[in-house]
Image: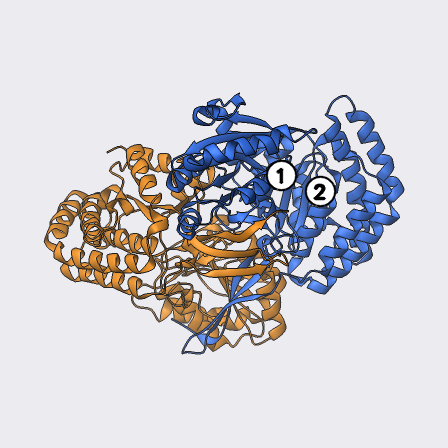
Chain colours: A blue, B orange
């Protein structure tokens, strides 16, 4: 099936969305979870072929992300059941206005329509994304990276079997066959077929989307996150937070990449930082990339200009010294990707300047940037973390996979 | 000043937005209104030159829209004062979540940053758009059509004088000097400078934006609006609503362009329609463009295929006969621009099928599409009517000119 043929099927499935009730969707999700378990052997067989083909072509970390087990599949099924248990975002009355002539105007949440997701080689994203798109009432079109395509195919087959058992249109979940760049390009320009495109991938994919997409998109997931240690910071707290934000899981988008330090505490703080992040860490010591002023205080790699605009996703931290909170805000707004930034301070005024001035999705006072996550923020789940300002900013939950329409009821009202 | 130089000024003004309070903005708006009045003579002089230069080049209707008077300027000032009196959309706490470890996560509404508006030759849009953008905390970049550019320049000068008197940065309101296509193209691709671009113009501008824009945009204002007269409709009500939606102001985007009629009532309804919209109207009789089935019942122009995909903005109505509400929904979803559609029916089930099935911003039961308007919907004002689904759908008020950020306050919390 060509991508265009698949999009026509998606549009046909979308035309029936209006008749599906939230309870039907929850029932289908439970059946989809059951079918995943039931098809464990087929999924593992397809996955084994993917892993075999990928060996030598991608890193061991990527192989690990690609590989499934009965336990992982059971986890995926459990994930779907948890999504089914969340409240439906559909049909919320967001505004209610009654005119003097009796006309009643309501703003009501509804599905977007067809949600397409481009993702890379993590097979579990297949079921996660499909469950979230479906729970929020949408038809889901998946475009998976080539390494995981066989696994994704087996997973989608199981999900579609679940939809069928529940009496819903199987074409609510569709997987694109073509894994070349062409199918990504076709999705980006599928005007009239795709209501929202979510790219989940690296910088290259995101910038191709910004440049070429004519369908509505939400950019997700690049995080050059900053922590600023203010002149009034509790330095013990600062050390704990910086270590957590940098080292607890450096490969994720909410990890810290740049540390900004107020001049007045740099001389006290930087030697303790080096001790904690470098000297005391036998496994995975952090490489510090220091600006000129920081390099006068501690040893480390001299920072190149690019180091303040790089998402390392590794045990590397760029360090910059600034005069005060205002200079910190200016530096961060000029170099951040708009994801998550934190200030460590005991001074309420500095905290206020920082939270007002920083133009990012999530602005922290005295806490680690690692909390930026749909689950941690109380949204129940997450489709990705938006770094744009329109529609959704920060973690995207189910409500962000809806739009609204106005439903207006009258009895012959004219203007 | 080049467009690029102007955008740098806008970005500098944006960097100070965090420090401005809602009360400062209201005060500035009142001063801006006063300055408009005070500069009436200068604005009228600039406008007279615009009108002189435009004569012979644009239609009389356009000349009328272009022409200002002391009364119209006073109306613009009053418009600004009304915006000042609205509640500020800034600083609303949209979500509040507290974690067991004491971390408090709030989703708070904030300005988008720099809002750019491309508009054509209505000088009053200059002050309307600037007031709405400013009230919602944004820096406003205006790009006016060449016919009204002199008038817009004089208006912006007055508005900036008001900002200065209020102690705010004059560069909160900026008018682009270049009125060629180049400046529109520069705005569309001003990544990092423009947080939202709102094109207010015809089909050509909107489709150029969809194709070329790399900055976030909201498409506004094209309305191919449908009214469907169901088999169970009260035909007297249907006549009143159709006449209102078509004839009360045909040049606006919420006017009806296509009438869809259920087969079973067509033989009763169409002769009455022709009587009301054609025969009884001495001034501006409506031209009916009829599909084959309708043409068998009444006289009129045979509809070409394009007539069901055209925003006439004139006393023209395309008429199509369908079997039932399901066929009506399918036709409308295939041909509408997603603006406003109505069903006239006494049957609750048909109304339900219609409101669930129609994929447009505003779906009416037994009322005229002409109500789609920020003021009528209780939003207090309107920047335009979005026909897209992301961020804002339907009339855009002040809240839709905001985004949000998460502000998270802890006491050393790590994950």
Q: Is residue A386 above or below residue B402?
A: above
Q: Which residue corresponds to the image point at 50% horizontal and 55% vertical from the top-left?
A: B338
The C terminus of chain A - image quarter: bottom left
For disc 2, the marked residue is A125
Q: Are marks 2 and 1 on the same chain?
A: yes
Q: Which residue corresponds to the image point at 49% horizontal and 29% vertical from the top-left?
A: A308
| Residue B275 marker | none
**Left of B197 or right of it: where is A288?**
right
The N terminus of chain A - image quarter: top right
Q: Quadrant of residue A288?
A: top right
Q: Secondary structure at mark 1?
A: loop
Mark 1 closeness class: few <14, some 14–19, many ≥20 residues within 10 Å: many
**Chain letter belonging to callout 2:** A
Q: CA distance from mark 2 to mark 1?
A: 10 Å
Q: Secondary structure at mark 2?
A: helix
**Relative image position of residue B187 (x, y in whole percent):** 36, 38
Asked if one can make out residue B361 in the rendered structure from this viewpoint, the answer is: yes
Mark 2 closeness class: few <14, some 14–19, many ≥20 residues within 10 Å: some
**Relative image position of residue B360 (x, y in whole percent):** 52, 58
Q: Earlier in the sequence, mark 2 or mark 1?
A: 2
Q: Give yes or no for contact between labels 2 and 1 (Cβ–Cβ under 8 Å).
A: yes
**Relative image position of residue B97 (x, y in whole percent):** 57, 59
- Residue reaching furthest front? A268
Q: In this orientation, which residue lies closer to the viewer: B257 or B194?
A: B194
For disc 1, the marked residue is A200
**Left of B96 or right of it: where is A116?**
right
Asked if one can make out residue B200 in the rendered structure from this viewpoint, the answer is: no
**Chain letter belonging to callout 1:** A
């Amino acid at each position: 099936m060509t991508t265009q043929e698949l999009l026509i099927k998606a549009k046909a499935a979308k035309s029936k969305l209006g008749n599906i009730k939230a309870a039907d969707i929850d029932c289908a999700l439970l059946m989809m979870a059951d079918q995943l378990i039931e098809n464990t052997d087929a999924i593992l067989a397809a996955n084994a072929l993917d892993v075999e083909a990928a060996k030598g072509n991608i890193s061991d970390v990527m192989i690990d992300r690609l590989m499934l087990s009965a336990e992982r599949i059971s986890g995926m099924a459990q994930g779907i059941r948890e999504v089914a248990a969340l409240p439906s975002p559909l049909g919320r009355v967001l505004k209610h206005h009654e005119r003097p002539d009796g006309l009643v105007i309501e703003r009501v949440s509804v599905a977007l329509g067809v949600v397409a997701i481009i993702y890379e080689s993590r097979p579990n994203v297949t079921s996660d994304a499909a469950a979230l798109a479906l729970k929020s009432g949408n038809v889901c079109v998946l475009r998976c990276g080539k390494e995981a395509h066989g696994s994704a195919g087996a997973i989608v087959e199981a999900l579609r079997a679940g939809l069928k058992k529940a009496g819903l249109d199987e074409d609510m979940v569709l997987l694109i066959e073509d894994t070349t760049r062409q199918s990504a390009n076709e999705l980006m320009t599928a005007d009239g077929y795709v209501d929202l495109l979510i790219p989940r991938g690296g910088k290259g994919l995101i910038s191709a989307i910004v440049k070429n997409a004519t369908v509505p998109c939400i950019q997700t997931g690049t995080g050059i996150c900053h922590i600023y240690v203010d002149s009034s910071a509790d330095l013990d707290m600062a050390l704990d937070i910086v270590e957590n934000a940098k080292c607890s899981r450096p490969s994720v988008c909410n990890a810290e990449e740049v540390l900004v330090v107020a001049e007045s505490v740099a001389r006290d703080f930087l030697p303790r930082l080096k001790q904690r992040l470098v000297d005391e860490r036998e496994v995975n010591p952090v490489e510090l990339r220091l600006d000129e002023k920081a390099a006068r205080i501690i040893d480390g790699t001299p920072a190149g200009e690019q180091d303040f605009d790089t998402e390392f996703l590794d045990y590397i931290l760029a360090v910059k010294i600034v005069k005060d909170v205002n200079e910190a805000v200016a530096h961060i707004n000029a170099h951040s990707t708009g994801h998550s930034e934190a200030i460590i301070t005991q001074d309420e005024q500095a905290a206020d300047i920082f939270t007002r001035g920083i133009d990012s999705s999530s602005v922290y006072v005295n806490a680690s940037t690692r909390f930026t996550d749909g689950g941690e923020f109380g949204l129940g789940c997450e489709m990705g973390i938006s770094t744009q300002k329109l529609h959704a900013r920060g973690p995207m939950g189910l409500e962000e996979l809806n739009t609204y329409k106005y439903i207006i009821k009258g009895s012959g009202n004219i203007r």
